[in-house]
Amino acid sequence: MLRRRIPRALAIANLALLGLYPVAWFAPLLSAALPVWGGSTVSVVAGLQTLWQEDVGLAFLLTFFAVFAPYLKTIGLALVHFRLASPRILVALHLMGKLAMADIFLVAIYIIAFRGIGLGTVTLHWGTWAFTLCVLASIVIGFLTERGRRLGPR
């Protein structure tokens, strides 16, 4: 039985995420003039480094959600796109994508909380948008891959 071919553009977009995620992790997410951060600029990696010194358990969870979950999902989709893995792993990759969204939610909660209680100011930088777009692109690529699989052979 023939399997539906994944469009080349979809596979290339997914591979691009392998390079774009690390850029987004090191890019400045926000500047916070807060008692907690003292006006420094925060990136995903810098935030995780600080968290590893403060709370190892939470740092482990957020490192998984922010770094490993999206990257493993991207690698898994690439393996499916190039027929190096069975499309049956798409279910697990879908779950991995849901876990990857947890960090976007946490960043949003922190920004809303700090702005809402008047502790200081939070200014978003391009890294927030880059990271968010990487996660959203991964969701769309995963959805289109699953949809193509459900449609069956051409």
Image (cartoon, helix red, strand yellow):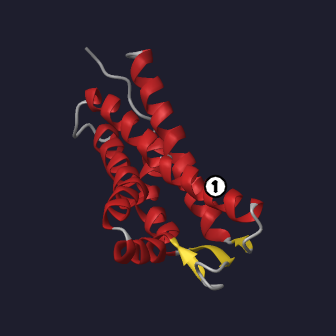
Residue 108 x, y percent position in the rendering: 63, 55
Say whether residue 116 is left or right of residue 93.
right
Tell me if residue 118 comes above or below residue 10 in the rendering: below
Say whether residue 58 is left or right of residue 126.
left
Tell me if residue 91 comes above or below residue 65 in the rendering: above
Tell me if residue 130 comes above or below residue 77 in the rendering: below
Q: Quadrant of residue 35?
A: bottom right
Residue 54 x, y percent position in the rendering: 39, 74
Q: Quadrant of residue 122?
A: bottom right
Q: Quadrant of the N terminus?
A: top left
The amino acid sitting under disc 1 is: Ala
Q: Residue at x 68, y 72 (%)?
A: 125
Q: Residue at x 32, y 50 (%)?
A: 72
In the image, 93 versus 114, the foreground residue is 114
Tell me if residue 12 comes above or below residue 33 in the rendering: above
Q: Quadrant of the C terminus?
A: top left
Give the residue pinned by disc 1.
Answer: 108
Please tell me whether mark 1 sits on a helix, a strand or a loop: helix
